[in-house]
Image (tube, coloured by chain):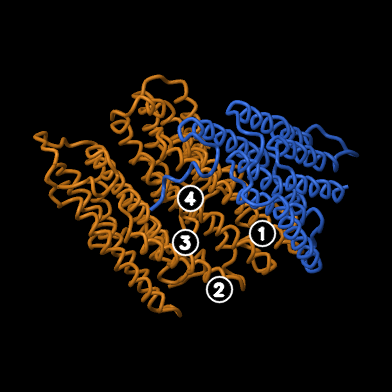
Chain colours: A blue, B orange
Amino acid sequence: MENVLSILFCLSLFYLSVTSRVKAYVTVLQMQGILLTVLLVFPFINHFSAYALILPASLFIIKVIFIPRYINKIILDLDIKRTIEPTIQQFTFLLLVVFVMTAIFITSHVLSKSTDIETIPFASGFSAVVVGIIVIIFRKKLIVHVVGFLVLENGIFLFGTSVASALPVMIEIGMLLDIFVVVFLMGIALNKISSTLSGFEVTALGRLKD
Amino acid sequence: MLEFSVLILFPLLSSAVCYFLKSTLSKYSVSLSVSILHLALSLMIFIGWYQPNLPFFFSTDSLSKLFLLVLSNVYFWVVLVSFSYLKRPVTSKAQAGKRYYFLLLNFYLFSNTAAILSNHFGMYWVAAEATTLSVAPLIYYYRNEDALEAMWKYLFLVSVGIAFAFIGILFLILSAKGSLLEGQQLFFTDFIKNATQLNPVWLKASFIFVFVGLSTKIGIAPMHTADIDATSNSPSPIAALMSGSLRITALLGVMRILQIVQPTSTYEFAKVIMIIGGLFSLFVAFIFMFKVNNYKRLLAYSSVEHLGIITLGIGIGGLAFVGAMYHILYNSMTKVILFFTAGNIHRKYKTREVDGVSSVLTLLPWTGWLFLLSFFAISAIPPFGIFFSELMIFEGMLFSDKPWVLAVTLFLMLFIFINMSKTLFQMLYRKNENEIASSEKERFEIIHFATIVILALLIAIAVASPILLRQNILNISKDFGITL
């Protein structure tokens, strides 16, 4: 089951690299949030306990409900144009993503021989980290950078579930809260950037240099 | 429970209290009281008059005791001068920044203390990310375009950096597969005890990710850019806080992982990475000192330089490591006074460009002379502490297996010193024909008082060399497997 979810997660990354609508990016975030929630709930299906649901529930609330809604609100409020304005061709971007993911899957497969890791979740998580960074590098819009950052965080989360035998719930929730506040602050900053620097793109940020 | 309340709960509570209080004076009083209590307890813990017994994911050792004292000390001085700082006139837009100032400052203390005292990698990560969140809105205090850009860059880059550090932590878990630590909680102490069982390949990967990730916060080149922008555009107490204590909190994360790596075969590799990071930071400071013409950016580059020296000292090991620990303490105090006095200069001349500043010594005699002395302190002129710590680091380098590092370091530092002094002396001495004639004499303020006390402390600690401090630093060295 973990493998199936991880592959679905990878598909969401491919969708991310072919779509050019900002809205679709947010939908991808929502999908990934749902996948991660299912991944967390799944081990407890046979022995249900309310305590075990605390983390999936908070993950669902933050990653599937709060953050996507908040980003959609920013897009509406700031009247950001619907397309993502790439700096490179969509097709080149897709090729890059495919190449990176292939490399990661092969490396993980090789590594799994010496260390006890589950190749598919491990590689999917790591792919999301790299795709997140590629999105940040090759997209101009700052709101898309925020989405890229969140994809990176989702990747780390997936990667973490494949590696760690669960961190204490308190710390996991602390991490989720941290990420939520980061996005919240980024949203506020974006609001200010659009009003004072009149732009939503990286090009608006070029004042500070030596 | 007392220590947990004073060090962690009180700052959190006073942060909440500051939200409800209306007057700046009452917020100031609450924050100052909390900071005094924090400083007193940190000092007692450091001296050994109080044996802390912290619950949950927290504990103390020699390293965290020193770092806690550095944080507490810097924070106290920053809070002390904050009231007079907030009274300064700002644009109407920036008035809003004052409202949350003390709230965020208290939250900063809470998150930093939690990070320093944490005994668990997960806890450290959560707290370190929280320090970014507390400081980012403070960078935007002036509510202008530059501050906004600086805040965005800092928030974004450091968050991505911290995410990388988390990948490093996950690699550390992977390195424990097949050892006694598999499936265990991520306590530093457990990992340090069983370090030799860890898988060296994953351990290397873990060190690189944690080091590179936290470099964004420490200000190690080439990840230093957001840090420079943030330090130079935030109000001077916040810049002092960032340069004096926030970078050190991030450095603690790297030192924790280094402590784990130390008994393993990965140690040499980690040392090389740290030396490269340190040298590259010095090189970046060396290049930019030639062209920078904004004095707050200049001070920010000086922070990159000194954190580079500290990283270098830790990487070299031996006596250089001991020197680096002293350097952490002295550098934090010196950075505080440099930014305090630079803030006064900014208030008078309304510009951060060096060209717009002249005759500081005549127009602002108190600030000017104290700025000059602070510059001497950071340039390692005796009897200020940095002279002794740098000497120790250099001696360590000379007698290490890489003496060439000393030659490179000295070359870079010589030019950094020349360029920095050229710029600062211009500000202090150069006469400008269209100078603002001012008959008003500079008043003695609390910032001057704080600067004088810190300068005196810098000399006193260095000259008296308290046994307690030396013993603590030797204990830290012992924890890192260094015996002199």
How crowded pointer 3 is (Cα within 10 Å; few <14, some 14-19, many 20+) is rated as many
Q: Amino acid at mark 1?
A: Leu
Q: Amino acid at mark 3?
A: Ile
The residue under label 2 is B268
The residue under label 4 is B249
- Which mark is first along the chain, 2 or 4? 4
In the image, what residue occupies the spot 49% across and 31% down?
A: A192
Q: Secondary structure at mark 2?
A: helix
The residue under label 1 is B172
What is the spatial separation of the Cα atoms under label 2 and label 1, in whole angstroms? Answer: 17 Å
Q: Is residue B178 visible?
A: yes
Rendering coords of residue B390 (x, y %): 33, 66
Q: Are marks 3 and 4 in contact (CB under 8 Å)?
A: no
Q: Secondary structure at mark 3?
A: helix
Query: Residue B468's image quarter?
Result: bottom left
Query: Residue B170's image quarter?
Result: bottom right
Question: What is the number of the mark on residue B476?
Answer: 3
How crowded pointer 1 is (Cα within 10 Å; few <14, some 14-19, many 20+) is rated as many
Q: Do marks 3 and 2 share a subunit? A: yes
Q: Amino acid at mark 2?
A: Glu
What is the spatial separation of the Cα atoms under label 4 and label 2, in whole angstroms? Answer: 24 Å
What is the spatial separation of the Cα atoms under label 3 and label 2, in whole angstroms? Answer: 19 Å
Q: Do marks 4 and 2 share a subunit? A: yes
Rendering coords of residue B60 (x, y %): 52, 50
Q: Amino acid at mark 4?
A: Thr
